[in-house]
Image (cartoon, rainbow, N blue to C red):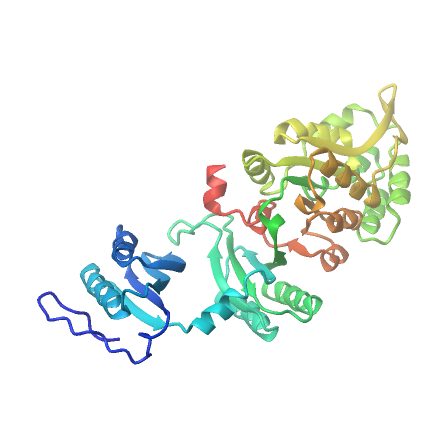
Amino acid sequence: MARPILPGERCTPIPDPWGLWNMREIVLINITGKDKPGLTARLTEILATYGITILDMGQAVIHDFLSLGILIEIPDEHRSSSVLKDILFAAHKLGISAQFTPIEEERYEAWVNQQGKERRIITMLGRKITAGQIAQVAQAMAANGLNIEVITRLSGRVSLANPQTSPKACIQMSVSGRLADADALRGRLLRISEEAGVDISFHVDNLYSQNRRLVVFDMDSTLVQAEVINLLAERAGVGDEVAKITEAAMNGEMDFKQSLTRRVALLKGLAEDVLAEVAAGLTLTDGAERVTATLKGLGYKLGVISGGFDYFGKYFQSRLALDYVFANQLEIVDGRLTGNLKGDIIDGPKKAEILKTLAMVENLSLEQTIAVGDGANDLPMLHTAGLGVAFHAKPIVRANADRAISNVGLDGLLYLMGISEREIRQA
């Protein structure tokens, strides 16, 4: 790049090695340097005096260092030499650098014609993000012919002097290109996730990605840190037997309805007062209160669809401001559990059916819904939702879910939804 024109110097017209004078002039201006208020205002003010059309514009600031790109079309009555000379002079006075790249019209039109083509969003989420993790994901993108166009940090900055007790780091990539085998790429990203210890979400960027309005959670081992039926079984003196059946059901090794019926039968005679005692001792999953409070603040409808028991779902409904709770009902007679359930059993297919009904009630498409769960009986619901997330899930669930959170708390869902730390703080 030629040195900047200094005050008092005679301005020599910029040579025209590209032969732009006889064709439409399209120029990419790249501005770099220390950021300060008024930079963009001054540069666009200069462009405005020449009647410049802005074809594209993008800016990023990292640690007070600015990178600004402006793609301009210069009107026929002006020459690029005058425009660029004035930009160079202003850049020198502002203490920043300016570089110019001519863009051929054919190349510009080819770029325009790429609009509307499928784009994908890659989200990396963990306690921290390392260069090695990003390198593996970037290599996977390149190997599949995808180009990373935009990288955005969604998580807040972490202080090195006062690190958070449970820090989270999240970056989001927007990628473009023709993908031949989406399943193969998902498989590769899953392996990277397991080996590198970072959660990776991969999905098509469409109209619904930023327009989801209903979020439903499983309860046991998702919203709360326990399988409640196991706690009840311990109080009934049948803890080991029930725990084995629960594990088999959650791993998909046993029919859920059959397993639930067998486990509830073992609770026969348990005093109703025990339910209140168990409920009072339950602990919400890390991040549960933050994610529900944030989503309610942003106007989302929230619900629980659980194969657990409605007594405990209703216990947390007021605490978390949930709009809906659907769970199985324990039959209680004379203050004791009978060992039976009331009404239809909520199993995997029933969960998906309830989600469809809620979407209709809220006048939403299924693409606008999100479901979060950990067990095999959650898979139908996760597959039905527009965004299905396996949360600290059993192996069979993680292998069959499109997205997973395994390294952070439940509030990691906010980042997978594309919600930034700034938006979380404002909710």
Please tell me which residue is depicted at 79% across the width and 44% down the height of the picture: 352
* Residue 341 appearing in the image: yes
Q: Quadrant of residue 398?
A: bottom right
Q: Residue at x 71, y 45 (%)?
A: 366
Query: Camera-side residue: 26 or 97?
Result: 26
Is 421 or 252 nearer to us in this picture?
421
Give the farthest residue toward the bottom. 17
In the rendered view of the protein, which quadrant contains the N terminus? Answer: bottom left
Q: Position of residue 185 (x, y in %)?
A: 66, 68
In terms of depth relative to the viewer, which is nearer, 205 or 88? 88
Kindly tell me whether residue 278 is visible in this rendering.
Answer: no
**Image x and y of residue 178, in percent:** 62, 69
Q: Measuring 56% from the left and 57% from the top, which residue is drawn there?
A: 123
Instruction: Indicate left or right for 109 with 320 as reference.
Output: left
Residue 113 coordinates in the image, percent (x, y) = 54, 66
Q: Position of residue 406 (x, y in %)?
A: 63, 54
Q: How many marks?
A: 0
Image-based side of 307 in relation to 296, left or right: right
Q: Is residue 427 left or right of residue 229?
A: left
384 in relation to 337, above or below = below
In the displayed orientation, state which residue is furthest to the left: 8
